[in-house]
Every structure is written in C-alpha cells, then in structure tokens.
Image (cartoon, coloured by chain):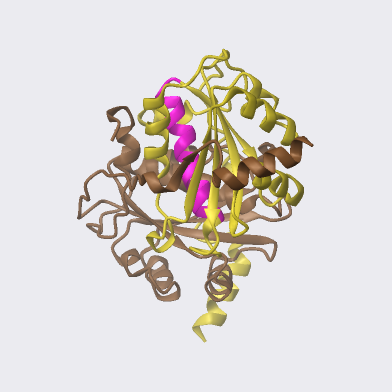
Chain colours: A yellow, B brown
C-alpha cells in the first residue's frame, strides 16, 4: 500500500460504536467533505438528512434490515438525490459524496459504514416515508456514524486481475479498433 | 473548511496537464486507492482499463465528446463494472472507487478529472467497443490523469440549504411518523 495514501486505506467499515454523540463541528465537517465531491455538470443533486435523535436512530435501525449498529451510532446521514436536478447522474454523484463522508469520518477519528438503500425499492420507500423525503428524491444510502468501538486495520483489496492495460480483451479489442479505422 | 480534511478539499477537477507521463508506481497507487473503496456486500464489481499509449489517448479524446484534455494527459483510467457480479449496485460501487482515485491523485500531486459516460448510451457503446469491454460490463466513466498545468484552490461547495436535521419535510414527516406509529 502506497504510504502517501494511508488516509484512504484507513477508511474501513466500522459497525461498532461507543454510543457517544458526534460533535456538531464534526457533522458539519462531514457535510463539507460530502459537498467537496465532484458532480456531473456541477449540478450538485445531493441532499442530506442528518438524524441524531436517539429515538429516531433506533427507529431507522428497525426500518433498514442491516442497520442494527444505528442503536449505538451518534448520527445517521441519509444521502439523497433530487432527481429533478439530475435524473441520470444522481446515483453516481451521491455515491462520490458518500465516499467522501466515509473517508472524512476516518480522518476525524470517527467510525462509519455505508448502508445500501437504492435501488432496493422496499427499503427506499419505507425510509423515504420516515425521513419525509419528497417523491422526486432518491435515497442512495444511510451512513451510520459514531465513535468507534473497533479499529479495523488499513487495507486495500487491490487485485491485479481486475486491471488490464490499454484494452480489456486485447485480441477482440484490436479487431474492433481495426473495424473502427476502416 | 475544516483543516483536518484538507486532503479532500484539495481534490479539484484538473483539465490541463503538462503532457508528461504518469509513473507506473503512481498508477499502481491510484488503483490501490480505487480498490480500497467499499462495495455492496464486498462484491467488488469494479474493473479497470489503464490507457497510457499516446495514440490510444488521442483516440479516446476523439470518441468522448468532452475529453480533449486526454491529448495532454499521461493516462486514462476507464472505470468499469461487471454487471454479472452486481447488476444493482455496480454504478455506486464504481463511483466510490472513482472518487478514491480522484482524491488519491490530488494526494500524489497529480491532476485528474471525472468524465461521465454511463448512462449516456451512445458514449458508453462507442467506448466499450474501443476498449474491448465485454457485453456484460458497464462503463461508468473515464478518468483523465496527468501532471497538472493548473492548480485550482481547495474548496467545498457546502450549502446549508442542502441539509436538514431529522426529517426533510418536518411537518409532513411528523405526520408520516404518526401514521407509522398507529
């Protein structure tokens, strides 16, 4: 792992928290990080609901099927996209913002985990209703955030089999290039 | 901007490069960063084609409508997803990997920019053919990477209007909560 990128390798999914609240300044910093992500045509379709109320966090844990860790989280950030702003690219724009939040959480000494929602319609509909999201919003994911009670080691899942130079299927690709040149 | 997150605010879209090649070790580091991203159910549907050949970079600049900067880039990373691995989540998984590459590039002193492809079918089909991608692959984006000939300042697009506490549409939301409780 390249030591210059240790801040990225240190981002791990953290699912156990102490139950302590997350400071207001840290939540603000996470959102600054989210909105530092790039977006298609700079349209910034992202919207965020920040849940910190104890009862509401517990309720979210009961609606999302894999969100029990919210019971000890200090906050949950719902990452939403306004489809009216960019119907075609909101998912990827919101995913970039989500990754920035996760990396930022690690930089701040917090633990966080991405809880997938869209495109699981049942999850998305139930959570949209609970969070009061307009019909036009998509809900990409929930992010649980808390003070970590576990510390997974930095890592990458680098796999050379997932990388190819110049062309994925060399022979096929070269044939295709020839065809494009004619 | 929270100074603890300056590495994230320093990631800006860089579209002008010196034309110098990108070191092999840096390309490897960018891919380590990409594969340090989280993915749904840890399925890692991402695949990468790394183009560094001068003629091939120029050809890509001619296929993607907004990719003239590839003519002075040192490399282009095509971020692909194998739909057979995860048809529902490959876009968001690949977007998280893409954002990690962009943040890593800034950390390494390189410049990079995200060039959207999927779901623009015409772009995606033409680039898939040129890159020799299998039918089952989606092509999320191209990332141009080079030695920067411009240095945009760190920033966030933080906007308080895009954030709401607890519930997006408070009144509506509370009504809905009541409904869910009955």
Q: Is residue A151 above or below residue B152?
A: above
Camera-side residue of B130 and A5: A5
Q: Position of residue B123 (x, y in %)?
A: 52, 73
Q: Is residue B170 magenta?
A: no
Numbered label tally: 0
Which residue is farthest right? B182
Quadrant housing the N terminus of chain B: top left
At x 63%, y 58%, the residue is: A135
At x 72%, y 32%, the residue is: A66
- The segment highlighted magenta reads A91-109
Q: Is residue A96 above or below residue B122?
A: above
Query: Magenta span: helix, strand or loop, mainly?
Result: helix
Quadrant housing the C terminus of chain B: top right
Q: Position of residue B57 (x, y in %)?
A: 39, 65
Camera-side residue of A181 and B173: B173
Which residue is farthest bottom? A182
Q: Is residue A154 above or below residue B165?
A: above
Q: Is residue A101 magenta?
A: yes
At x 43%, y 61%, the residue is: A40
Residue A169 appears left or right of B10? right
Q: Quadrant of residue A137?
A: bottom right
Q: Quadrant of residue B120?
A: bottom right
Q: Is residue B70 visible?
A: yes
Camera-side residue of A87 and B152: A87
Q: Position of residue B74 (x, y in %)?
A: 33, 56
Q: Is residue A164 visible?
A: no
Q: Position of residue A97 (x, y in %)?
A: 47, 45
């Amino acid at each position: 792992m390249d030591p210059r990128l240790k801040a990225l390798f240190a981002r791990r999914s953290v699912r156990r928290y102490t139950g302590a609240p997350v400071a207001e300044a840290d939540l603000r910093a996470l959102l600054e990080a989210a909105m530092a992500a790039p977006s298609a045509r700079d349209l910034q379709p992202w919207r965020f609901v920040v849940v910190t109320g104890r009862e509401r966090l517990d309720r979210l844990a009961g609606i999302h099927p894999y969100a029990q860790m919210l019971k000890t989280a200090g906050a949950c950030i719902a990452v939403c996209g306004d489809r009216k702003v960019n119907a075609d690219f909101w998912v990827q724009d919101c995913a970039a913002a989500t990754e920035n939040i996760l990396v930022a959480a690690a930089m701040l000494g917090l633990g966080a985990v991405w809880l997938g929602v869209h495109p699981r319609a049942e999850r998305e509909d139930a959570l949209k209703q609970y969070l009061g999201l307009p019909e036009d919003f998509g809900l990409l994911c929930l992010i649980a955030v808390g003070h970590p009670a576990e510390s997974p080691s930095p890592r990458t899942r680098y796999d050379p089999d997932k990388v190819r130079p110049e062309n994925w299927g060399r022979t096929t690709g070269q044939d295709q290039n020839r065809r494009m040149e004619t």
